[in-house]
Image (cartoon, rainbow, N blue to C red):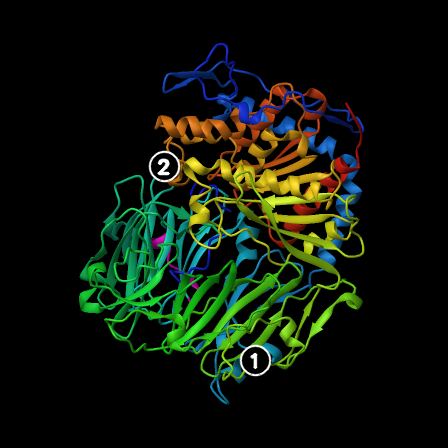
């Protein structure tokens, strides 16, 4: 659930829901926060279907905790093998199909629009790593990518080789991994982790073919395209190669999907002979492994919390213990770098005999360091221990140091200045006085030019330690993804590629020129550049849709006076202020960034007059880590109040019609949306809840469920009475208003979801049907994917169908007629 509820980890160069009668149970925590007595309601009329909403059976079940007692008649649904549960899911699917039947033509139209915007074939520019050029492409008509490579022949320099290869065809391409072939064989494919060996002879990867995220390890010999049959290990998460290219470290999960053990295997040996390197017996902690960029060390992290969007475990823990393994001597054992200290984190890289460490450990030297964010420290290999760290770089006033990447000649730092992302490079090695702490600007940094319009930055793979070019993907709500190479030696940038978007009127597209002049200044932020730096943009310009779609940042005052960032987006031609419908998206958990990058599917709503809004509520990512802390644990209600405040703002400020606000939540974001809907049901006309975490209290009270104990760091352990009372105040399943009206809701789940049990969505819908107004709850539908997992099923075309279904639902319920009662 820390790994379970999460759907975007920040950049990683750190490689990288029981209602109760208060008369019977007077001691239960008050539900007054969610009272809706006396509020006006709107009933919306839908065309009748031939089906009546399913009614789930009730099985008496009495739950107790901390002297409190309550009933949960849908507890039986947690046994997903119960034939009655399978039957109920099928009935709900049939009802959803009947409810949506009159939208089938609209779904087809939306799907066609989305597909028409995609190029038939998608190819990434090759990226040099050692003697090879690696790239991916999605073949015409296919769902999934193919990973390929070709030799990089040195003639006029590798840059020319790279671009000539990209433009002129790939010749002797070698297919390393074809997702389409795996999906064709198994019906489902999810590749978790891919690692090429240092000698480029082997590919180790983890594969899930069922959707339950029980990844098995496969190792492919790239010299003859054969798979090592003796290395099929189940429950593998992270991978790291030793420098010899034939020793592989991997982490293994226990029965609760907790990565708890590090093992080492030699190619050609049987998996039963794999050596155990470390076992983490404390169920509160997970282990993760990664290689330093130069390949000389493997770091082993034991963490209190994990976070992952893409099936891999990227650690951003609150308690951490770190070990190092010499990758040149993989049998040499572990060396502990630091002990566990609550709230202290260490992320290690290596360069020329030194460990460079990103940490937030307390420092006595710099009284200005608040502990929010990180600073950079260093120690020699022979002194590899946290006690020996010498501070190098403090972030400076109003700047938060968030992440790093390292190359032979350059250090790359990811920064945040008052909410705006920055990246800079610093020449390596760093000459410094051990007794003097330095600020970033003392080291003559080159700040990478970035589009200024709410840019999001995603690092490229950047595997090659010797490279002087840093690759990143830049995006904004109105700018299709830009792949940019930053030459850190020459201090120039090159736009390598931009996402190809078809069938958008070019009359409203602004093309930005390739040269550095006054025009480009409208789109690049040079406010951190020194006058002596000469900037050039080699190659072509890029297209921007800001003349067609407006994107603005607002500030919303929440219940306690804190200002919440809100991003709004709409079509300048289709949007009607005060009349248009709106969709408000939020997440607010695990300190994760709410994805606001370019999404062409979104245009199908915007072109029909919708406003799309993103609420960066507390609990997610902010200017510094305090934004996360103020929305987790005993502060979680802040997230919900923030989201409600953002919805109210959109209406009271006249951005959208007062009866046309909808909400979107995904995974842990459904806790936010579900609780907000309970708190203010009259505020929302509709909601979409995807793979929803809703039965929060019951789930956290059951430590036998996968990943539950890992979520205690984020939400608290309800075995502690104070957390139990607090969680019960907002847990969506526990706070559905009795007899009240509810918004129309599309709840989607996956039967094989191992992160959020399918029963959470089923119990929520069943209780809505039993508890809420029957007229309104008939427009609540549950759609369950029988075959997929947490990440659903299918590739790019299947995603378009799913999004078309979601948008068609919103259009249907927003078009319904209603009268105020």
Where residue 56 sits, quadrant-wise, is top right
Res. 194 visible in picture: yes
Residue 671 spot, x, y in % from top left: 53, 36
From this view, report whether residue 596 is shown above or below residue 699: below
From this view, report whether residue 628 is shown above or below residue 419: above
Residue 303 spot, x, y in % from top left: 32, 48
Q: Mark 2: give few (<14), some (14-19) or many (20+) Cα within 10 Å.
A: many
Q: Which residues are magenta?
A: 222-232
Q: CA distance from mark 2 to mark 1?
A: 49 Å
**Mark closer to the chain start, 2 or 1:** 1
Q: Say which of 677 and 528 sits in front.
A: 528
In the displayed image of the protein, which residue is found farthest to the bottom?
156
Q: Is residue 229 on the magenta stretch?
A: yes
Q: Say which of 260 and 549 sits in front.
A: 549
Q: Which quarter of the figure is the C terminus placed in?
A: top right
In this view, the mark in front (2 or 1): 2
Q: Is residue 147 left or right of residue 221?
A: right
Q: Which residue is mark 1?
A: 163
Q: Which residue is mark 2?
A: 709
Q: Is residue 514 left or right of residue 339?
A: right
Res. 81 visible in picture: no
From this view, report whether residue 465 is shown above or below residue 93: below
């Amino acid at each position: 659930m820390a790994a379970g509820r999460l759907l975007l980890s920040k950049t990683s160069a750190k490689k990288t829901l029981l209602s109760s009668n208060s008369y019977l149970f007077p001691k239960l925590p008050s539900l007054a926060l969610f009272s809706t007595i006396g509020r006006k309601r709107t009933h919306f009329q839908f065309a009748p279907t031939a089906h009546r909403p399913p009614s789930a059976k009730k099985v008496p079940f009495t739950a107790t905790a901390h002297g409190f007692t309550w009933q949960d008649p849908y507890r039986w649904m947690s046994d997903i093998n119960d034939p009655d549960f399978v039957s109920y899911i099928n009935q709900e699917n049939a009802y959803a199909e009947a409810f949506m039947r009159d939208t089938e033509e609209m779904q087809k139209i939306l799907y066609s629009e989305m597909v028409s915007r995609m190029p038939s074939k998608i190819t990434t520019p090759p990226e040099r790593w050692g003697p090879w050029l690696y790239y991916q492409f999605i073949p015409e008509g296919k769902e999934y990518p193919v990973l390929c490579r070709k030799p990089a022949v040195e003639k006029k320099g590798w840059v020319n080789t790279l671009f000539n290869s990209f433009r002129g065809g790939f010749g002797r391409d070698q297919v390393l991994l074809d997702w389409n072939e795996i999906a064709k064989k198994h019906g489902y494919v999810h590749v978790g982790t891919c690692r090429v060996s240092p000698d480029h002879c082997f590919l180790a990867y983890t594969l899930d073919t069922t959707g339950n995220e029980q990844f098995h390890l496969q190792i492919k010999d790239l010299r003859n395209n054969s798979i090592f049959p003796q290395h099929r290990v189940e429950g593998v998460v992270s991978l790291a190669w030793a420098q010899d290219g034939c020793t592989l470290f991997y982490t293994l999960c226990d029965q609760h999907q907790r990565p708890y053990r590090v093992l080492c295997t030699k190619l050609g040996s049987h998996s039963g002979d794999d050596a155990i390197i470390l076992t983490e017996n404390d169920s509160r902690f997970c282990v993760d492994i990664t290689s330093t960029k130069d390949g000389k060390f493997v770091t082993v992290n034991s963490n209190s919390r994990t976070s992952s969007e893409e099936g891999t475990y990227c650690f951003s823990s609150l308690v951490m213990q770190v070990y190092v393994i010499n990758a040149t001597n993989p049998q040499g054992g572990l060396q502990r770098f630091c002990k566990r200290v609550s709230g202290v984190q260490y992320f290690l890289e290596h360069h020329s005999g030194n460990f460079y460490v990103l940490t937030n450990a307390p420092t006595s030297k710099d009284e200005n360091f608040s502990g929010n964010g990180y600073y950079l420290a260093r120690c020699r290999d022979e002194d590899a221990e946290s006690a020996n760290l010498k501070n190098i770089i403090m972030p400076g006033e109003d700047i938060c140091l968030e992440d790093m990447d390292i190359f032979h000649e350059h250090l790359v730092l990811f920064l945040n200045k008052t909410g705006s992302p920055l990246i800079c490079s610093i020449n390596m090695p760093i000459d410094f006085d051990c007794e003097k702490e330095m600020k970033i600007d003392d080291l003559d940094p080159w700040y990478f030019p970035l589009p200024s319009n709410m840019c999001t930055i995603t690092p490229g793979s950047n595997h090659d330690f010797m490279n002087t070019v840093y690759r990143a993907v830049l995006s904004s709500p109105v700018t299709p993804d830009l792949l940019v190479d930053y030459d850190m030696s020459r201090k120039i940038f090159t736009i390598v590629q931009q996402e190809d978007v078809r069938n958008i009127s070019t009359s409203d597209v602004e093309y930005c020129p390739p040269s550095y002049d006054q025009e480009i200044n409208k789109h690049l932020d040079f406010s951190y550049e020194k006058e002596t730096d000469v900037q050039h943009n080699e190659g072509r310009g890029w297209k921007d849709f800001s003349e067609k779609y407006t994107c603005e940042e607002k500030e919303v005052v929440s219940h306690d006076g804190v200002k919440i960032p809100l991003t709004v987006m709409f079509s300048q031609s289709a949007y009607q202020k005060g009349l248009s419908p709106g969709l408000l998206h939020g997440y607010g958990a695990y300190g994760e960034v709410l994805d606001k990058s370019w999404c062409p599917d979104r245009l199908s709503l915007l072109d029909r007059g919708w406003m799309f809004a993103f609420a960066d509520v507390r609990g997610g990512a902010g200017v510094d880590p305090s934004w996360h802390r103020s929305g987790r644990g005993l502060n979680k209600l802040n997230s919900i109040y923030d989201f409600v405040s953002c919805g109210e703002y959109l209406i009271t400020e006249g951005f959208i019609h007062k009866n046309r606000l909808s909400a979107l939540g995904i995974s842990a974001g459904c806790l936010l949306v579900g609780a907000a809907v309970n708190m203010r049901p009259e505020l929302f006309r509709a909601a979409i809840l995807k793979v929803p975490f809703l039965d929060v209290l019951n789930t956290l009270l059951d430590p036998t469920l996968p990943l539950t104990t890992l979520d205690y760091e984020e939400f608290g352990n309800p075995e502690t009475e104070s957390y139990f009372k607090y969680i019960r105040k907002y847990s969506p399943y526990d706070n559905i208003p009795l007899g009240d009206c509810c918004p129309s809701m599309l709840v989607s789940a996956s039967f094989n979801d191992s992160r959020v049990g399918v029963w959470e969505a089923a119990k929520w819908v069943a209780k809505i049907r039993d508890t809420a107004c029957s007229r309104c709850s008939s427009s609540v539908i549950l759609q369950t994917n029988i075959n997929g997992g947490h990440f659903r099923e299918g590739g790019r075309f299947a995603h378009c169908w799913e999004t078309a279904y979601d948008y068609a639902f919103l259009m249907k319920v927003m078009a319904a007629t209603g009268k105020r009662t």
